Amino acid sequence: MKVWIDQDLCTGDGLCEEIAPEVFAMLDDGLAYVKEGDKIFSDPGGPEGLAVIPDGLLEATIESAEECPGECIYIEVE
C-alpha cells in the first residue's frame, strides 16, 4: 500500500507526523509530506509523491488519515 498527501488541502497541524513520524514529515513550508526512510517526497509532492507504507505502520497511517483536519491524506491499494 502507498500513501500521499494533497498539499493544497494540508492545514499544517502536524497530527500525521505526531501519529506516524516514520511515514510523515513537516517541512519548513508548514506542510506535511510523506517519506520513505530518509527520502521525503516533496518534489513533487501530491499524487506523484507516493510513498510505500512500511510494514507494521498501516494502522498508524490510517489513523493519521482519519484524524487529519484537512482530510488530505490518501492511501492507495496496489
Image (cartoon, helix red, strand yellow):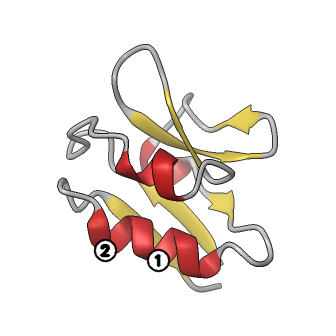
Looking at the rendered structure, the number of numbered marks drawn on it comes to 2
Say whether residue 55 is left or right of residue 28.
right
Q: Is residue 45 above or below residue 50?
A: above
Cα gap from disc 1 to disc 2, whole angstroms: 6 Å
Q: Position of residue 19 (x, y in %)?
A: 50, 58
Tag 1's secondary structure?
helix
Q: Is residue 31 above or below residue 59?
A: above
Q: Which residue is mark 1?
A: 62
Mark 2 is surrounded, within 10 Å at the Cα level, by few (under 14), some (14 to 19) or many (20 or more) other residues, namely: some
Residue plotted at (50% across, 40% down): 33
Residue plotted at (60% across, 56% down): 50
Q: Are marks 1 and 2 in contact (CB under 8 Å)?
A: yes
Tag 2's secondary structure?
helix
Q: Position of residue 34 (x, y in %)?
A: 57, 47
> What kind of residue is marked 1?
Ile
Give the image quarter of residue 10: top left
Q: Nearer the viewer, residue 59 or 3?
A: 59
Say whether residue 45 is left or right of residue 73.
right
Q: Position of residue 52 (x, y in %)?
A: 71, 64
Q: Nearer the viewer, residue 49 or 39?
A: 39
Q: Is the N terminus in the top left, top right, bottom left or bottom right quadrant?
A: bottom right
Q: Which residue is mark 2?
A: 66
> What kind of residue is marked 2?
Glu
Say whether residue 70 is left or right of residue 14.
left
Q: Is the C terminus in the top left, top right, bottom left or bottom right quadrant?
A: bottom right
Q: Position of residue 27 (x, y in %)?
A: 48, 23
Residue with the most extreme front position: 18
